Amino acid sequence: MKPRPPQLISARRLKQRIKALGKKISRDYRRRDLVLIGVLKGSFVFLADLVRSLSVPVALDFVQVSSYGASTASSGVIKIKKDVDLPLVGKDVLIVEDIVDYGYTLDYLRRFLKNKKPRSVKICALLDKPSRRKVRVPLAYKGFTVPDKFIIGYGLDYNEKLRALPYIGTL
Ligand code: IMP
Ligand code: MG
């Protein structure tokens, strides 16, 4: 059997934090027209738990981006691989991302989605890794701050591996 990667955030803490985030988002988006946009692929586990912690109606869509560079870091050159399908005009968009590292991905996505004329665009990131930040991105909702380590599990991968790990770990 392979050794399990060291744990940084337990499944229990993830559950508690996401419940609290869901409550806050539900309060803030009452009587709004909320569309959650998951950033594929890393956000899929977080997004699945987050939607089930909401008490307001919500529509879902997805984007996928590619960033050219080493596999463990983004280069700042971002391209849209998969656009959203829903029209976002007048909607309250909340981008759901797994982790913010340099900030290039979310900085790009925020601008890209703003061009579709939604009423608002905000960001909900499960993890914030502020140590290497290159561009400022406003995080309206944030789960945890993590140290400058390579993070895996709960949707986050290393070369497509370890996404299914039920906790947040480090390599
Ligand atoms: P940024 O543009 O550097 O903020 O990159 C963010 C993206 O890089 C995230 O959506 C992740 O896909 C990936 N990423 C950054 N740090 C990690 C990590 O520690 N583990 C797994 N993926 C990461
Ligand atoms: Mg990602």
Image: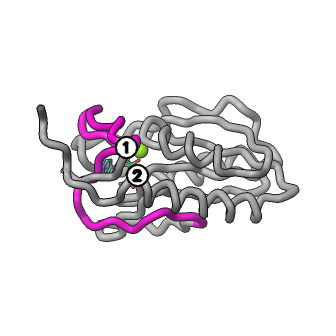
Q: Regarding mark 1 in the picture, which secondary structure is present there?
A: loop
Residue 105 placed where, x, y %? 44, 50
Residues at circles 2 and 1 in contact by the CB criterion of under 8 Å: yes
Q: Is residue 68 magenta?
A: no
* Residue range corresponding to the magenta coloring: 140-165
Quadrant in which the N terminus is drawn: top left
The numbered mark at residue 166 is 1
- Label 1 Cα crowd, 10 Å radius (few <14 / some 14-19 / many 20+): some
C-alpha distance separating marks 2 and 1: 6 Å
Q: Is residue 107 visible?
A: no
The reply to whether the residue tagged 1 has its Cβ within 8 angstroms of ligand 1 is no
Q: How crowded is the residue under tag 2: few (<14 C-alpha within 10 Å), some, or many (20+)?
A: some
What residue appears at the point 29 percent right and 60 percent down from the top-left corner?
8
Name the residue beneath numbered marker 2: 11
Residue 18: give x, y in percent of width and height.
55, 57
Residue drawn 56% across the image and 40% down it: 48
Where does residue 159 sit, x and y in percent of width and height? 24, 34
